[in-house]
Amino acid sequence: MSKKGRSKGEKPEALIVALQAANEDLRTKLTDIQIELHQEKSKVSKLEREKTQEVKRIRELEQRKHTVLVTELKAKLHEEKMKELQAVRENLIKQHEQEMARTVKVRDGEIQRLKSALCALRDGSSDKVRTALTMEAREEARRLFDAERMKLLQEIADLKTAKKQVDEALSNMIQADKIKAGDLRSEHQSHQEAISKIKWESERDIRRLVSNSV
């Protein structure tokens, strides 16, 4: 009788010991899972930080490239504009020299006509000379007016052409900026999607790891 009592008393104690061992084993597994989960979270955070830094670095690099491109474009535009202004200046100087030569020629012709008129006055034909001088004066005034008008029209046409070229260059530069900005936005969106995908895959792996461990 006493042996049976002891056997029955020992079974609960062994069961308790087994349960405690199983509980301790579960606690150990849970601690390991928590450590692995913490490590995975650290990896995900590290990947996110690295990806964010990479996106930031790429964006800064693109912005620097864009700044250099705009600066070079402005410098090229300025250089071309200076060349164009130099060509216009040389053309104006040439036109001025031609105008001066024509003016000298006209004055020489006027002097000759005045000399002829003086000779005619001495010969007594004053009415004819006066009429001839009046007609010549009108003709000269008309020629000068037409020449000045043509000169002004040419200057206006040159200014319109220069303005059109500057507007086209500015429009091209603005369009290039828009395209570059669109590329940067697309690249940033791609990086954000890649980060989200990495984060989602990491969380999925962590959940699968926890499920397998349990």
Image (tube, helix red, strand yellow):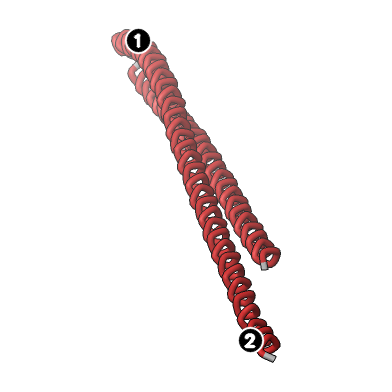
Which of the two discs, 2 and 1, labels the residue nearer the N terminus? Answer: 2
Would residue 53 be seen by someone viewing this image from the given angle?
yes
* Location of residue 57 in the rendering, given as x and y in whole percent from the top left corner: 47, 42
Which quarter of the picture shows residue 81? top left
Disc 1 marks which residue? 108
Q: Residues within 10 Å of mark 1 (few under 14, many from 20)?
A: few
Please, what is the three-letter code of the amino acid marked with disc 1? Asp
> Mark 2 falls on what kind of element?
helix
Camera-side residue of 100 and 81 = 81
Tell which tag, 2 or 1, sits nearer the viewer. 2
Disc 2 marks which residue? 9
Circles 2, 1 touching at the beta carbon (< 8 Å): no
Residue lying at 47% horizontally and 32% vertically, measured from the top left = 73
Q: Residues within 10 Å of mark 2 (few under 14, many from 20)?
A: few
Camera-side residue of 121 and 198 = 198
Residue lying at 67% horizontally and 64% vertically, measured from the top left = 213
* Location of residue 2 in the rendering, given as x and y in whole percent from the top left corner: 66, 89
Q: Is residue 176 above or below residue 122?
A: below
> Mark 1 falls on what kind of element?
helix
Q: In the displayed image of the protein, which residue is found farthest to the bottom?
A: 1
Q: In the displayed image of the protein, which residue is found farthest to the front?
A: 1
Rounded to the nearest angstrom, the CA distance separating label 2 from label 1 is: 146 Å
Residue lying at 62% horizontally and 51% vertically, measured from the top left = 190
Would residue 135 be seen by someone viewing this image from the given angle?
no
Please state if 145 lies on the left or on the right of 58 as rendered. left
- The quadrant in which the N terminus is found is bottom right
